[in-house]
Amino acid sequence: MSLDLHTTAPPGGGGDPARPARATHRRPASFTKLDLKFSPYLYVLPFFVIFAVFSAYPIIYTVWIALTDRSPLNATISFVGLDNFVELLTNDPQFWNAVVNTFGIFLLSTVPQLMLALVLANALNRKLRAQTFFRMAIAMPIITSTAVVALIFSMIYAKEFGLANWLLDLVGMEPIDWRANRFASWFAISTMVDWRWVGYNALIYLAAMQSISKDMYEAAALDGASRRRQFWSITIPQLRPTIIFTLIVSTIGGLQLFTEPLMFTSGAGALSGGSEGQFQTITMYLLDVMNTRFRWGYAGAVALVLFLLIALVSLVNYLLARRISSDK
Amino acid sequence: MTTTTLRPPARPAGRPPRDAHKADRIWKATPLTWVGLVFGVILSLFPFYWMIVIASRTNDAANSWPPPFLPGGKLGENIQRVLENGDANIVKGLMNSFLVSGTITIATVFFGSLAGFAFAKLRFRGKNAMLLIILASMMVPIQLGVLPLYILMAKLEWLNTMPSVTIPFLIGGFGIFMMRQYAEQAVPNELIEAARVDGCSTWRVYWHVVVPALRPAAAVLGLLTFMEQWNQFFWPFVVLADPANPTVQISLRSLNTAYFADNSQIFAGTLVATLPLFVVFVLFGRQIIGGIMEGAVKS
């Protein structure tokens, strides 16, 4: 789509350079040439400056720091090779606890989240009165911050006087201490994630559904395919690229989970994620190592392993999603 | 797309499809659809309603059994209490959040449109490699570099100041990508050519031809950026440890760490922190939804 601006540029000359610039103002050829050659770089420069200083450099530095025992408490820094990684992977139950928690909450939230979003989008993809109202209403949760969501749900899941326990009481069940029990805390945190993101994903699916040709559905209907059948045989396969997209976005977000579990407790030691770390995620553990134990080299190793996990799971999701839908 | 075999042969133009009535029925909403949708809407709106219920009651009434479901009359009082709460500094937090989110929004729209224009319409060496770097940058979580970034902020003496949460986010890959996608189709090449023939520099082409054409995309990018930045938590939590100079989300955190959890005050705080975005959503909800849906189809 690029234009070769060189050929359309005027041969230059004309105009009074002292006059204030106007649309018809002409410039000397040499200036035009320089302008065409260098201004694109000038226009993309801000990104690359910010990226280099605040992204690329810290990432490279993380790799280096992970190979040392750097800490604000150590007077000298020594190179320790892969020691941090070895310790992390073979001799750190708390890290593995955080990995299990993160994956548990990730699965518990992502699977229902995307399925609910699909169903909701399918419903919105009908002839409806008040389309705009429904879209606005299901999109509302995305305007709240994760911190706000976590605070609201923290009270819903309060041990005493909580809304969730009131509902349980209505149906004759025992109240649950949502923060004490591991699975209960995962469930509570998952609902926070889902409440905020189901509508967002539904809108994305809806957009993709609307770009599927209606002829396909009509032909299927004439052939006697039920709605359910159409959903599985037309909608889902056609949505494959979008499903992969939402899966990867949810993976990146889900494995970085931090704010919801942090705000789930109110005390100062919130980074430890519950009395026995039952809902401490990898990111919470990372900050725990970094800011409470001051093992900076070790924190570098945690950050790198977290990144590798995200990349790996994204890849697995991608392969799975590709396979599942192409079978249909 | 793999299922093109399902596509029926093209119908002769002008003639209604066979059995049009039956085909039309697919798109009708069934009663079950309605029930599901109404249920979904209730679930998605209820927490907002509940926020108002708790924010408008005394703390005792908020912590009662059964939980309250109707708003009380203490909303103004609770909001006043939370605004005056010295530990949370929520007024300072609101001002800081406006400053930070506003600055980032303006910078993202400006730099994003400039770079998007360059990537969509200009020729230069290394363009594709640069685009690839931008795409890759969107995939990298901030946690990966959080420690060196923190050390860098400490060395720059930006800890507990607003530059630490502003400068690194002035322009990101998403803004550039979105603007590039839009510029490719919204800015006609003929118009650029005509401007070149008239002797416009690339800057003047950007300012007089590209900027007017990009206005709708700029509005959407601006809205999404503002919302995202207003809601930032992780990085502010790391670098704004001193409660004297928070963003509004960090103020909420301070409210929650108080020894006696005063829920009606906390909820008044969440209401205050959400109100600006609520206003934005009421005014520009359609554009925000349009932006989310558009971004999805293109990606």
Image (cartoon, grey):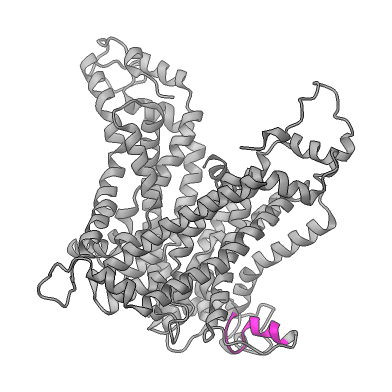
Residue B146: image x %, image y %?
30, 63
Total numbered labels: 0
Q: Position of residue B289 (x, y in %)?
A: 59, 49
B180 or A257: nearer the eye?
A257
Specify whether A318 is left or right of A268: right
Residue A211 in view of the camera = yes
Residue B284: % across, % down: 57, 49
The answer to which image quadrant residue B254 occupies is bottom left
> Based on the displayed image, in which of its 4 quarters is residue A224 positioned?
top right
Residue at the (53%, 82%) spot, across then down: B263
Q: Is residue A133 left or right of residue B189?
A: right
Q: Is residue B204 above or below residue B141?
A: above
Q: Residue B194: which quarter of the image?
A: top left
Q: Tell me residue A190's x, y (percent).
A: 56, 70
Q: Residue furthest left?
A: A76
Q: Quadrant of the N terminus of chain B?
A: top right
Region of the chain picked out in magenta, as a range = A157-169
Work out whether residue A18 can be spotted. Answer: no
> Per the image, is B66 magenta?
no
Tell me, yes or no, whether the highlighted magenta stretch contains residue A163: yes
Tell which of B245 and B192 is nearer to you: B192
Q: Is residue A74 left or right of residue A209?
A: left
As drawn, B111 above or below B194: below
Would you place residue A314 above or below residue A223 in this image?
below
